[in-house]
Image (tube, rainbow, N blue to C red):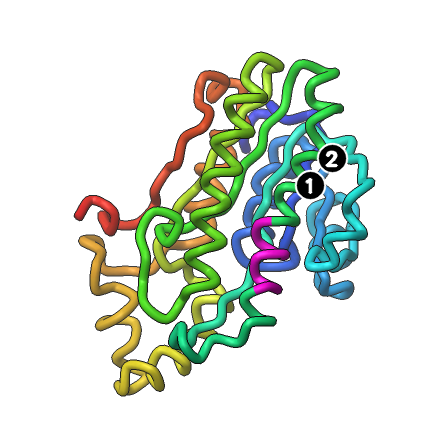
Amino acid sequence: MKEQDLAGRRALVTGAAGGIGLACAEEFARRGAHVIVADIDAAGADAAATAVGGESWVVDLSDTPALDDLSLDVDILVNNAGIQKVAPLHEYDPDTFRFIQRLMVEAPFLLTRAALPGMYARGWGRVVNISSAHGLRASAYKVAYVTAKHALEGLSKVTGLEGGPHGVTSNCIDPAYVRTPLAEKQIADQARIHGIGEDEVVERIMLADVAVKRLVEVDEVASLAGWLVSDKAGMVTGASYTIDGGWTAR
């Protein structure tokens, strides 16, 4: 059992009804944090909150005007919520592009903005942004996702620079393809666009650029998030940590 080094801390994790977000919520709860599970899926958020002994916040983070005047009393913020849509740029639906920017850039900005005053007042805070190898590298057919993740990297760095004097750190985690429903839903679209069978997508597309030929597991991402929110990572800020099997080493 891990030490209760997060006892007394309040953590907000977005997109935490499943996948990476749920794994982070479980990691923090095991270490004593009170976790707020934020998700648009009401049933999933409630179930996850019950499982970790926390609370749920059912919220549509793409409705960004509703977040303009938000105030958050949290010590830890994990910006994780996101979606993926695969299509050629010249065929990409403009409304989908705008939706992804709202959900994956504007919402993290507004949540961070809402959390910082309390963190500053306490002299301690941790912001972890779940980015992607696509925050550092581009892939064809993912214009909205790649754009959003690159923007998230910039937001995280600025947060780190401004937050540092106040005891607040901000970092990105940049995984390759993680074994989540989000990745699994891409397989059919990738097969169609590349003209290959679905059984070939993982090997020829998802694992093509990595040296370690497997998908990332959610608990591996959560483990790094757990370290980044610990006191031992107090000098780590404005950084981007890859869990990508060597993808960005090329």
Q: Provide the residue designation for mark 2.
A: 114
> Which residue is found at the position 71% from the left and 40% from the top?
35
Magenta range: 98-105
Label 1 with label 2: CB-CB less than 8 Å = yes
> Which residue is found at the position 68% from the left and 32% from the top?
33
Residue 241: x %, y % from top left: 37, 37
Which element type, helix, strand or loop, lies under badge 2?
Answer: helix
Residue 151: x %, y % from top left: 48, 46
Residue 8 appears in the rendering: no
In space, the residues marked 1 and 2 are separated at their CA atoms by 5 Å
Residue 183 appears in the rendering: yes
Location of the N terminus by quadrant is top right
Rendered view: 56 above or below 123: below
Q: Provide the residue designation for mark 1.
A: 111
Bin the neighbour count of mark 2 within 10 Å (Cα to Cα): few under 14, some 14-19, many 20 and up.
Answer: some
SS assignment for the magenta stretch, majority: helix
> Which residue is found at the position 59% from the left and 28% from the top?
126
In-image side of 54 versus 212 (left or right): right
Q: Choose top left, top right, bottom left or bottom right for residue 60.
A: bottom right
In-image side of 207 versus 6 (left or right): left
Q: Does 173 appear in magenta? A: no
Q: Choose top left, top right, bottom left or bottom right for residue 95.
A: bottom right
Residue 157: x %, y % from top left: 47, 31
| Circle 2: residue type | Ala
Bin the neighbour count of mark 1 within 10 Å (Cα to Cα): few under 14, some 14-19, many 20 and up.
Answer: many
